[in-house]
């Protein structure tokens, strides 16, 4: 896209002339790389960090970007030290916004790694900081991650309660991606409770919200989960949804969580056997 082409030109100049400016730019454009080219965005951040060691806000932003995008690659071993360094540096600098974001992605990474107690502590602190900053988007998305933590702790009632609160928050600030994330959590929770109809309803709403937000990261998780729910009765449609999920990830790089990978493999096997 033209946006990424312009960013590439500016970052290539920064590599040779002003790495601090490049790190500030990669930090400011982190969501653009998240939406469109996660592997490339992480590569730029790592290159800039290698040549800019000053303990300043620019480095904190670069560490946040490299850590966030490593989480999206399911490379939690690489993500954690970057995000820990970002959080520690942000705390020393008094940068509450970067600290809250780093804790959010640490919590997300630990949730995906199923280190649930650690994830809960990190996300709760992140949400508290976002509340102090009056940043409802951060609060709503953080509550969404907390809902997933409770889901994976098998606390379905707690997960539902937190996710419903999160949905009110993200709807209140018109955060389409956040709505998709929370609806995905509600869908997975309903699936865990054995309510396939409610799960499909939540997941279908998640797909619409995530598509409107231009997401290519967790949209595939929602599509893959719907495919798993319908493969026994609609194998053809399930295979198409699974193929769409795979295509989304191939386009932007990164990888799905192990549970989604397994679900897509199961859909493919059952779909072709039908």
Image (cartoon, rainbow, N blue to C red):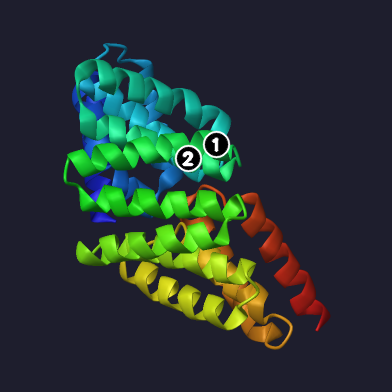
Q: Residue 144 in the image: state x and y as whole percent.
A: 41, 55
Mark 1: secondary structure = helix
* Vertical placement of residue 262 versus 73, above or below: below
Cα separation, mark 2 vs mark 1, equals 5 Å
Q: Is residue 95 left or right of residue 127?
A: left
The residue labelled by disc 2 is: 120
Q: Residue 53 in the image: state x and y as whole percent.
A: 32, 12
Q: Is residue 42 left or right of residue 116?
A: left
Q: Residue at coordinates 52% horizontally, 64% vertically from top-left? A: 220
Q: Residue 127 in the image: state x and y as whole percent.
A: 32, 43
Mark 2: secondary structure = helix
Q: Residue at coordinates 61% horizontally, 70% vertically from top-left? A: 191
Q: Residue at coordinates 30% horizontally, 15% vertically from top-left? A: 52
The label on residue 241 is none
243 or 266: which is nearer to us? 266
The residue labelled by disc 1 is: 117
Residue furthest toward the top?
A: 54
Screen quadrant of the N terminus: bottom left
Crowd class of label 2 (few under 14; some 14 to 19; many from 20; radius 10 Å): many
Q: Residue 97 in the image: state x and y as whole percent.
A: 22, 34
145 or 117: which is nearer to us? 117
* Vertical placement of residue 193 versus 252, above or below: below
The quarter holding residue 131 reads: top left
Q: Is residue 84 left or right of residue 267?
A: left
Q: Residue at coordinates 21% horizontally, 18% vertically from top-left? A: 93
């Amino acid at each position: 896209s033209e946006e990424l082409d312009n960013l590439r030109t500016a970052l290539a100049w920064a590599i040779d002339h002003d790495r601090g400016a490049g790190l500030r730019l990669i930090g400011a454009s982190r969501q653009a790389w998240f939406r469109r080219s996660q592997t490339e965005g992480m590569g730029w951040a790592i290159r800039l960090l290698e040549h800019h060691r000053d303990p300043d806000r620019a480095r904190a932003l670069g560490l946040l970007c490299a850590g966030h995008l490593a989480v999206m690659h399911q490379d939690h071993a690489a993500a954690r030290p970057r995000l820990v360094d970002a959080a520690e540096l942000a705390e020393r600098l008094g940068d509450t916004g970067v600290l809250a974001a780093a804790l959010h992605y640490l919590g997300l990474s630990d949730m995906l790694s199923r280190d649930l107690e650690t994830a809960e502590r990190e996300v709760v602190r992140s949400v508290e900081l976002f509340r102090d900053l009056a940043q409802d988007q951060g609060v709503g998305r953080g509550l969404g991650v907390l809902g997933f933590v409770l889901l994976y702790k098998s606390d379905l009632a707690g997960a539902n309660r937190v996710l419903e609160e999160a949905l009110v928050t993200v709807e209140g600030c018109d955060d389409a991606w956040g709505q998709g994330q929370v609806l995905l959590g509600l869908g997975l929770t309903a699936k865990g409770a054995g309510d396939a109809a409610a799960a499909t309803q939540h997941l279908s709403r998640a797909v619409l919200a995530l598509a409107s937000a231009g997401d290519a990261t967790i949209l595939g998780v929602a599509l893959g989960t719907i495919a798993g729910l319908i493969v026994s009765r609609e194998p053809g449609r399930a295979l198409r949804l699974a193929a769409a999920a795979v295509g989304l990830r191939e386009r932007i790089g990164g990888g799905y969580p192990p549970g989604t990978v397994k679900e897509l493999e199961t859909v493919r096997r059952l779909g072709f056997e039908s």
